[in-house]
Image: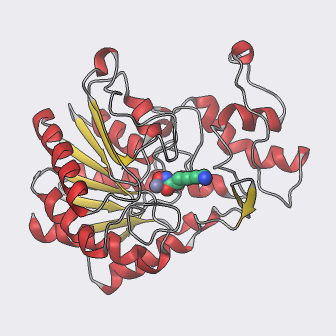
Amino acid sequence: MKTVFSPRHSDHWLRYEYSGGQAKPCFEKPDRVEFVKREILNRRLGSILLAEEFSLDHLCAVHDESYIRFLQECWAQWVKEMNPELDAIATVFNRQSFADHIEPRSIEARLGKYSADLTAGLGPKSWYAIEASAHVALSGAKQLLGGEKAMFSLCRPAGHHASAALMAGYCYVNNAAVAAQYCLDQGCDRVAILDIDYHHGNGTQSIFYERSEVFVASIHADPDQEYPFYAGRADECGALKGLGANLNIPLSLGTTAWPEYQTALQQSMDAIASYKPDVLIVSLGVDTYEEDPISHFRLSSDDFTKIGKQLAALDLPSLFVFEGGYAVGAIGVNTVNVLEAYSEAV
Ligand code: OKS
Ligand code: ZN
């Protein structure tokens, strides 16, 4: 399996993340994908291609144009109005609808309009990494449609919490959604997205919730107990034309190990098989790992091999898009375990 990568990911880094009322060092750091890249080379998974450039239209096909403009402009405006020594992050939020039609002027107000919560900020060059990450996903999709059986887009920052006009959960542009829309625009009739990150892919769900051409399935920690809290329940099945095209499988924290996970994976695969998509996009997070510092499932490194093997049974052209995973010592092994087992089984 070939990988697409961009060194521009390292343009994105933040000083702090906020949790439990505290500023802490970030779990989401540039190292993460460098470790994955190193393991890909060590294990000879396949060649590593640099991302191609794509038009911004592909991002605007799933995101509001005003939101993308905000991501581009944020840092320059933050420097003018706020403190250039600190990350650009929201302090106020638009929870009232009176100003929804207004593009706010001040950067504080714009950050609040386009942030879901305090889990996503922007640094001096974050936009360049965000754009490159979308290009990594688009390049993978292009290769797939060009005839590759499977591709790995080693995206950073991740995307699955980002909705049409909100950044959240370390995510800015929804890379998997951008890739899915690209596949449709290039002639696919139906695309399935399977999100196996530990966290519910609430951004992806919201982008495609009322559409039938993209089936979205997510296996994740129960939102009663885990971020993103406000989406991911089993009764969220899609709406309007998208009714029936959304599947959530929440699993309980602390106790979920391979037997429960395997059953959920099979259930999601059965649903995808009956949807009969032209391509599969896997939002691949490895924060389901037992030693992940922010998550509470109990998958072992060997279990990631089993995931790859099991997914191969779908026998679909597959684009793996990287999402979360914070146990940097094992992040490469766990990720490549999925990809290598998938490649060997198809
Ligand atoms: C705040 C929790 C923030 C979680 C961010 C989730 C990042 C992730 N106490 N998403 O898949 O890995
Ligand atoms: Zn995650």
The residue shown at (27%, 68%) is 304
**Where does the image place residue 42, in percent across and percent down from the top left?**
33, 86
Q: Is residue 170 in sight in this rendering?
A: no
Could you tell me which quadrant the C terminus lies in? bottom left
Image quadrant of residue 17?
bottom right
**Where does the image place residue 209, in percent across and percent down from the top left?**
37, 26
Relative vertical location of residue 149 with respect to residue 168 in this rendering, above or below: below
Q: Is residue 187 left or right of residue 3?
A: left
Q: Residue furthest front?
A: 255
Q: Is residue 165 left or right of residue 21?
A: left
**Where does the image place residue 15, in percent across and percent down from the top left?**
74, 64
The residue shown at (78%, 26%) is 104
Q: Is residue 344 left or right of residue 11?
A: left
Labels in figure, total: 0
Relative vertical location of residue 333 with respect to residue 154 in this rendering, above or below: below
Q: Is residue 67 left or right of residue 286?
A: right
Q: Nearer the viewer, residue 290 or 211?
A: 290
